């Protein structure tokens, strides 16, 4: 990916977080959690990572949604022609596998991390039938590999430095439902608000 593409992803993440940050802080406050905590910092970083994935994968939104079925169900057919794309797909999900165990207790188990990342990738690939993108089995495999690497990295750090994770969880409802609640808020924001807000943000810059 070239520099301009990375710049575009960065601007998409920034514009997303300008909306998601205050919404997240309000949710945390209403749930009785301490807003000023390490958990909040990691949560905002996690939502920023999701925003970057959303920008890269081109999930449809309320302004741009049309059926265009394109499938590849044969693994690794293009790895020799585009190895950098496979590497990028792996790296894209490393932060997800790394951050989930820091936020919610169930994701200390690698099976839950892989299960969620499988769900997220399948969701992305299914929605891409409403875009110009190809629904590709390779994306699932490389994303899961990246998530597994992220989980191994955080597990190694926890063992090495005897860290207590997840960070600052003290609310049973938050622990049981937080992940899915924030994901729903994120997806609604991205589908309904982000296309208009991002266009406004780009117009303001240029």
Image (cartoon, rainbow, N blue to C red):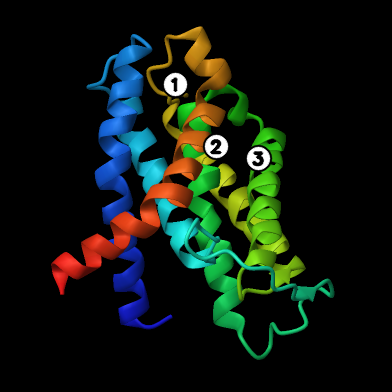
Residue named by callout 1 = 164
Q: Is residue 134 visible?
A: yes
The tag earlier along the polypeptide, 2 or 3, is 3
Residue named by callout 2 = 155
Q: Is residue 153 visible?
A: no
Label 1, residues with CA under 10 Å away: few <14, some 14-19, many ≥20: few
**Quadrant the C terminus occupies:** bottom left
In the image, residue 174 sits, relative to residue 204, either above or below, namely above
The tag earlier along the polypeptide, 1 or 3, is 3
Label 3, residues with CA under 10 Å away: few <14, some 14-19, many ≥20: some
- Whether residues under marks 1 and 2 lie with C-beta atoms below 8 angstroms apart, the answer is no
Along the horizontal axis of the image, is 122 left or right of 165? right
- Label of residue 116 in the image: 3
Q: Quadrant of residue 55?
A: bottom left
Q: In what element is the residue under mark 2?
A: helix
* Image coordinates for residue 62, horizontal then vertical, percent: 50, 56
* Image coordinates for residue 54, horizontal then vertical, percent: 48, 57
């Amino acid at each position: 990916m070239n520099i301009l593409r990375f710049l575009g992803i960065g601007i998409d993440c920034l514009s997303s977080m300008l909306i998601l940050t205050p919404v997240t802080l309000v949710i945390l406050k209403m749930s009785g959690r301490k807003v000023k905590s390490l958990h909040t910092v990691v949560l905002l970083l996690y939502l920023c990572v999701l925003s970057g994935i959303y920008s890269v994968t081109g999930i449809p939104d309320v302004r741009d949604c049309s059926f265009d079925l394109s499938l590849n169900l044969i693994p690794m057919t293009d790895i020799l022609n585009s190895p950098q794309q496979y590497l990028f797909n792996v790296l894209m999900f490393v932060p997800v596998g790394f951050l989930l165990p820091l936020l919610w207790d169930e994701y200390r188990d690698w099976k839950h991390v892989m299960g969620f990342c499988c769900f997220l990738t399948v969701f992305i690939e299914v929605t891409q039938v409403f875009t110009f993108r190809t629904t590709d089995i390779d994306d699932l495999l490389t994303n899961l590999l990246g998530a597994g690497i992220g989980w191994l990295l955080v597990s190694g750090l926890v063992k090495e430095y005897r860290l207590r994770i997840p960070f600052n969880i003290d609310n049973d409802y938050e622990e049981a439902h937080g992940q899915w609640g924030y994901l729903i808020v994120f997806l609604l924001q991205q589908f309904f608000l982000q296309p208009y807000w991002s266009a406004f943000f780009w117009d303001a810059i240029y």
